Every structure is written in C-alpha cells, then in structure tokens.
Image (spheres, coloured by chain):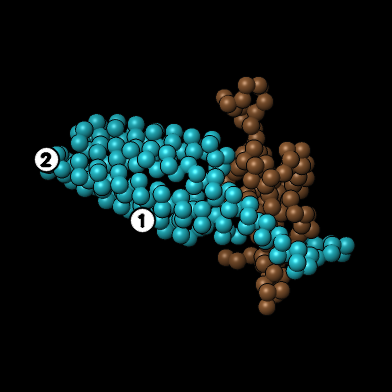
Amino acid sequence: MNSGHFDQPDSAFALEALVRIDVDRRRLAARFTAETWWAAPAQALAVAAVVASPAAGVAVPMSVVAALATMALVGIDHAFRKRTGISTNRPAGPVSLAVLIALCALIVAAFVTSLALAMIGERSWIIASTSAGFIIMLVGVAIYDKAYARDLRRAR
Amino acid sequence: MPADPRFDETIHALTRLRLCALLRPLDAASFSTLVDTLDVSEANLSKTIRNLIELGYVHTSKQTSPERADSRRTTTVSLTSRGRTAFDGHIAALRKLASTEAL
C-alpha cells in the first residue's frame, strides 16, 4: 500500500532488484532440473506399468496394476518435493503447460492402444505400446523439466 | 492477465521482495530451500517471514520430518492470495520503471 512517506524506487533500484530476482529464480530452476536424472526414468517406469496394465487382464487386474503404478507416481512426486524443497501442483507457465498437455495426450493414446490390443487378443503387441509409453515419458519429463525451469525464470 | 503496476512499500525491501518473487510461481517452498536459494542467514529469513506473516502476505506450515534427528519440524512457506496480488502489482511497477530507464 502506498503511503505519503514512501519514496518510490528509482530505476537503478528497479534494475538491480530485477537482476537479483532473476539470479534467485535461476538457482531455483537449477534445483528443479537437478532431479531429472532419477525422476524421469522413475516416472517413465511407473507410466509404462500403467500402459502395460491391460496385459494383466481387462477390468480388475488392469485396475490393480494401474493403481499400484499410480501410487508409485505419487511416491516419486513426494520424494521429488522432499529433495528439492519445492512444492508445485501446476506448470510454471505456457510452455510447460503445453508440454504437459502434449505428454498427457500421448500417454493416454499409448494406454488406449494397449487397451485395444488387449481387447482384440493381441496382448503380445502391448510390449510395443509400453515401450513407446516409456520412451515418451522419459523424454517428455526431461523436456517438461527444462520447460518448467524456463517458465520459472520468466514467471511474473 | 497482467497486473496493474502498484508499488507496495511493505515488500519494497530487497529480501522481502526476493522472497515473494521466489514463492510466486510455487505452491510452497521449504525454509532450508529458501535459505540456500536466497543465500541469506536463517535469522534474516526468519525475521523476513515473520514480518510478511504479520502483513498477511505469507503463510507457513510445519511438519515433522523423519530426516531430522531432533524433534524440530520442517517449515514450508507460501504466498497468500493477498501476497500474490501485492507482489504482482509491485513487480509490474518495477518492470515498468526499469523499461522506462532502458528507453
């Protein structure tokens, strides 16, 4: 709130403050991306299990496998928050949001493919959709982390 | 939607401003992460957080931590909606001022 006694900052202070904020956010972004080396493969394995779950049998067995894999994803997220000290439930900006949407769409497509293969009795082909899901998630998480770090530095 | 530029003297001090800037894009951050990232002393950060809590700009929560050998809890810090509004206006004003200088 403005008061009559507040001396508004000059442009030199404004520039210095913005530079300091940028440095801080770069440090924070580096903390985030420092975890990608283990978080990406771990999440990729869990998602691959979800994509492969129709091979266990449609409905109940698939649901059990998917539920366990989802619990693993929650555990990975918890470990990530503990290691980074950062808690976030949303993308940091438009680029990370776009990457997240694309990633989710591709994973859903991989899962639907597995489900269709299971329903037509071609379970042996589920390994292909599972492999695709793993690679998509592995690469996608790495791209998302970089996009998140970029958006973090550019946040308002 | 961009915020209207609006200086807020209560977060004008650099440490307060830097803390708000770190918390703005996050849901929360741990106290130790903030100390490391801001490169300030724990005492300095504690005082800054206390001041911002009094203003209603920041909220803290404490959890027990299995990583600590003692009974102390870990603290997480987050901006309140009031804090986000104040920060958004202030940073918009700083950016406007800085861009005016650049011209």
Where, by quadrant of the figure, is residue B53 drawn? Answer: top right
Circle 2 crowding by C-alpha within 10 Å: few under 14, some 14–19, many from 20:
few
Q: Secondary structure at mark 2?
A: loop
Residue B70 higher or lower than A54, as above or below: above
Say which residue appears at 60% left-offset and 66% top-offset.
B2
Viewer-closest of A36 and A102:
A36
Q: Residue furthest right?
A: A5
Residue B84 in the image: x percent, y percent? 65, 54
Residue B35 in the image: x percent, y percent? 67, 41
Position of A126 with respect to B36 (left or right) is: left
Residue B51 in the image: x percent, y percent? 78, 45
Q: Colour of chain B?
A: brown
Say which residue appears at 75% left-offset and 69% top-offset.
A11
Q: Secondary structure at mark 1?
A: helix
Mark number displayed over residue B87: none
Chain of the residue that carries numbered disc 1 in the rendered image? A
Mark number displayed over residue A102: 1
Q: Amino acid at mark 2?
A: Gly
Tell me if I can see residue A57 in this picture.
Answer: yes
Q: Colour of chain A?
A: cyan
Residue A76 in the image: x percent, y percent? 44, 36
Q: Earlier in the sequence, mark 1 or mark 2?
A: 1
Mark 1 and mark 2: Cα distance apart in space = 29 Å
Mark number displayed over residue A121: 2
Say which residue appears at 69% left-offset and 52% top-offset.
B18
Position of A75 with respect to A84 (left or right) is: left
Quadrant assignment for the C terminus of chain A: bottom right
Q: Are marks 1 and 2 in contact (CB under 8 Å)?
A: no
Chain of the residue that carries numbered disc 2 in the rendered image? A
Q: Amino acid at mark 1?
A: Ala
